[in-house]
Image (cartoon, helix red, strand yellow):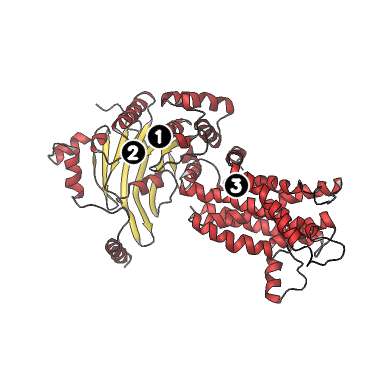
Amino acid sequence: MDFYAIGMIWLRDIIRHFRDRIRLLSSITRPVLWLLIMGTGLKASFNMSGVSYVHFIFPGIIVMNLIFAAMQSTISIIWDREFGFLKEILVAPIPRISIVLGKALSGSTIAFIEGLFVLIFTPLIKINISLVGLFLLLPLMFFIALVCTSLGIVIAARMTSFEGFGAISNFIIMPMFFLSGAMFPIDNLPHWINFIVRVNPLTYGVDLLRQIILGIKIFSFYIDFLFLIIFFLVMLCIGIFEFNKH
Amino acid sequence: MNSYTFEKIIEVKNLYKYFGQVIALEGISFEVYKGEIFGFLGPNGAGKTTTINILCTLLSPSSGEVIVNGFNVMSSPDEVRNSIGIIFQELTLDERLTAYENLDFHGMIYHLPKKIRRERIKEVLEMVGLYAKKDYIVRTFSGGMKRRLEIARGLMHKPKILFLDEPTLGLDPQTRQYIWDYILDLSHKEKITVFLTTHYMDEAENCQRIGIIDYGKIIDLDTPDALKNKYKEKSLNEVFLKLTGRDIREETVDTKEKLKEFLRTKKRLR
């Protein structure tokens, strides 16, 4: 373990992120658009006992910001490879595992902060989160961000160009988001979709946050948590393996 | 004329590197002595960068032994990484950070404490004449300034050996001269061993010894004067062309070449 190196990689990504105004702006406008347009547009056709549609999708919107930010910050791996900076890190006397951990931590920190932006809307759409709830919600958000970042690292480590990553974002992020129960309930779906929903880590992330924010759940807290932990560890191992291959 | 001692700092023995079926290095062996400026010359695609990448642990050898500063690149890569500084052919700066941040992060991954980092950054930036620009974003720098910043970065952790892969590529004569003055000065004052590749023969004249590589093999290795005498040519350029031919090379091996290499490998395997 090399804390100097982890710290350097983390700090560098944070500095780069906050210098990028456009990314910051889009991380705020994205949830506004979804909550406003989808929330009000689908309000009438949605029927679920006691919960309004805006409230139903709210945990999902948090997860959306988490995964978008996590994936976007792992793009920096591809960026570094194309522009050579990765070489500078790879010839330094630091273990590869520290590179992966540094990236995982910087990506999840950024994603967590972007997830917090969504929480600003709670008073606006009249959701009450208790102090105890918040106490649970924040670490869980960071954890979900970590899971998303670890997936992003594995994808980015295997990608060779930016163009490829654009496709990944269309073929992975969007389907993962839509098939996570973020936008609609997942109890009456055809079998093949149901399978994807069950292996999708976001399903468990959304379920986890929805339990805490709204008290609605599909799986128990422990199943959600266990699935995410296992998924994270598997991704981390693959990520370290990919970086060691060089 | 030789100010360096004959203590070996790099030892390469019978080094092979394959990329799939293609042979990039075909059993090269050479030594670099402590404190010397060693030039590695060869046409495009001859194996120069592959050799540097193996010496600095970015690539692993297919077979053979490589010792850098007393450490084996395969068994103790971190010790090797600690002994060397590298300036790659392409720029490896983070262009969105300031010059200072680039160096500070470099110091962090080489485990220099904050106070020492601050001192060294000032020292190396003053050396390359960029201290006044330390808080500028690197993207705003010219090509020559970026090169100088990279050299400053490569020296920050006081490496024993400095690798320079075509350090003056695409720079104007003034900057080239400037960079060479540093290299000579460094080798003279700090006794750093310099291993460099270049296409400019006038630059190669500054080296104490030169190795000429082509098709993954070292063709000859000696001092510039000895090479000129041996091949009875007036300039290194003529020696180089005599040894490597006048054909223009492709950077990537073309199909015909690949086929040739493939057949050669087949023969060896049989």
Q: Position of residue A103 (x, y in %)?
A: 60, 47
Q: Secondary structure at mark 2?
A: strand
Q: Residue at x 64, y 64 (%)?
A: A175
Indicate the chain on which mark 2 is placed.
Answer: B
Q: Residue at x 20, y 43 (%)?
A: B240
Near mark 3 (Cα within 10 A), the count class, few <14, some 14-19 or many ≥20, is many
Q: CA distance from mark 1 to mark 2?
A: 23 Å
Q: In terms of sequence position, does the residue under pointer 1 or pointer 2 come before the other? A: 1
Can you identify the residue that label 2 sits on? B196
In percent of width and height, residue A215 lies at 85, 58
Separation (CA) of disc 1 from disc 3:
30 Å
Letter of the chain that mark 3 sits on in the rendering: A
Residue A131 falls left or right of residue A106 = right
Quadrant containing the N terminus of chain A in the rendered view: top right
The numbered mark at residue A161 is: none
Q: Is residue B76 visible?
A: no
x, y percent for residue A225 = 76, 57
Q: Secondary structure at mark 3?
A: helix
Q: Which residue is mark 3?
A: A103
Foreground disc of the pair 1, 2: 1
Q: Is residue B239 among what the camera can see? A: yes
